Image (cartoon, grey):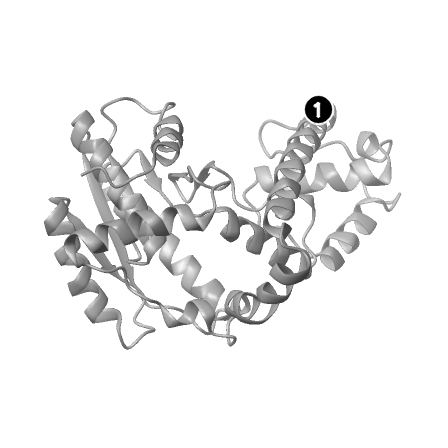
Amino acid sequence: MDASPSNLKALFTKALAPLAPEAPLAVALSGGADSVALALIAAEYCAQTKRSLYFFHIHHGLMAQADAWVAHLHKFSQDLNIPLQVRHVQVDLAAGLGMEGAARDARYLALARLCHEHGVAALLLAHHRQDQAETVLLRLLRGTGVSGLAAMRADVQRGGMRLLRPWLDIERAELLAVAQAYEQRTGWAAVQDPSNHDPTYARGALRSALAPVLNTYWPAWCQTLVRHAKQAGEANEVLAEVAALDLAALSVDPVDQSFSLFAWRALSAARQALVVRHWLQEQGVAMPGERRLAELLRQLDRKSVV
């Protein structure tokens, strides 16, 4: 099975370089063309290297076609001789995250559990340049900071699992070509998720209404936003280093992790905020919004507080 262009294969292999040669892998398989392309390349690679591979599919129960998709993916997995693990989840619509956010959280939690159950060293995700550009734009519109503008990372730990995204700077057309070549050869076609262009959802609205305008007037918008994500990621790394150095100089108590407010108040306002964000992150505390953070900083800066 030689379904993948050489550049996709090379980037895929490069992404796995930090892993032990025998470490089991998994592909997050939605059934769409992007994840199908990744599954095909991963299956070929693992067959050649004798590495264990799983396909993980999350059934959200939100689409009428969801059961049919599972059956369709079982056929695909059997043809490739790769075990498919399906996990049903309940999406908490009352969590205040919106449909997309709640579904995403439920999905990643289920994927983390599957990785743990099967001893998977890394979960492979098929996000590409357009996905990354959309993420940057949506986060910018929501008022995110530098960390948020860094968008998705190619190699990151989340929820106790390692996520690898080998194709963040690759055009989706290259992935579609892989999936389409497989369809022409076997007759098996990737699924079409109607929510991808449903304007009810933020990303669907972007794809159906905003992207066509951007493509007409700013045809390089995806490349530009992906470049901004890289620059924001680099800036975020520098800020994290500065915050860590500043925090280390604040006489942090090794027991309760408290720090010297007297020393903290000697920092500039920007570095005070940076240190507090860094400290909250180290404590595993959910990052507060700008108003709550501003109030926290105001209270810490009160001279009566010691």
Q: Along the line of sight, which residue is nearer the eye, 202 or 247?
A: 202
- Rendered view: 64 above or below 114: below
Q: Are there few (<14), some (14-19), or many (20+) residues within 10 Å of tag 1?
A: few
116 with respect to 264 (left or right): left
Any part of residue 218 in sight:
yes
Which residue is disc 1 drawn over? 245
The secondary structure type at the circle numbered 1 is helix
Query: How many dots with numbers?
Result: 1
288 with respect to 194 (left or right): right
At 70% from the left and 58% from the top, the residue drawn is 143
Q: Quadrant of residue 259?
A: top right
Q: Along the line of sight, which residue is nearer the eye, 151 or 87?
A: 151
At 15% from the left and 51% from the top, the residue drawn is 77
At 47% from the left and 66% from the top, the residue drawn is 100
At 78% from the left and 55% from the top, the residue drawn is 295
Q: Quadrant of the N terminus?
A: top left
**Badge 1 amino acid:** Leu
Q: Position of residue 90 (x, y in %)?
A: 33, 68
Any part of residue 116 in sight:
no
Q: Position of residue 287 (x, y in %)?
A: 62, 50
Q: Position of residue 96 (x, y in %)?
A: 53, 70
Q: Quadrant of the C terminus?
A: top right
Q: Position of residue 111 (x, y in %)?
A: 32, 50
Q: Quadrant of residue 162?
A: top left
- Rendered view: 153 above or below 249: below
Q: Along the line of sight, which residue is nearer the eye, 110 or 259?
A: 110
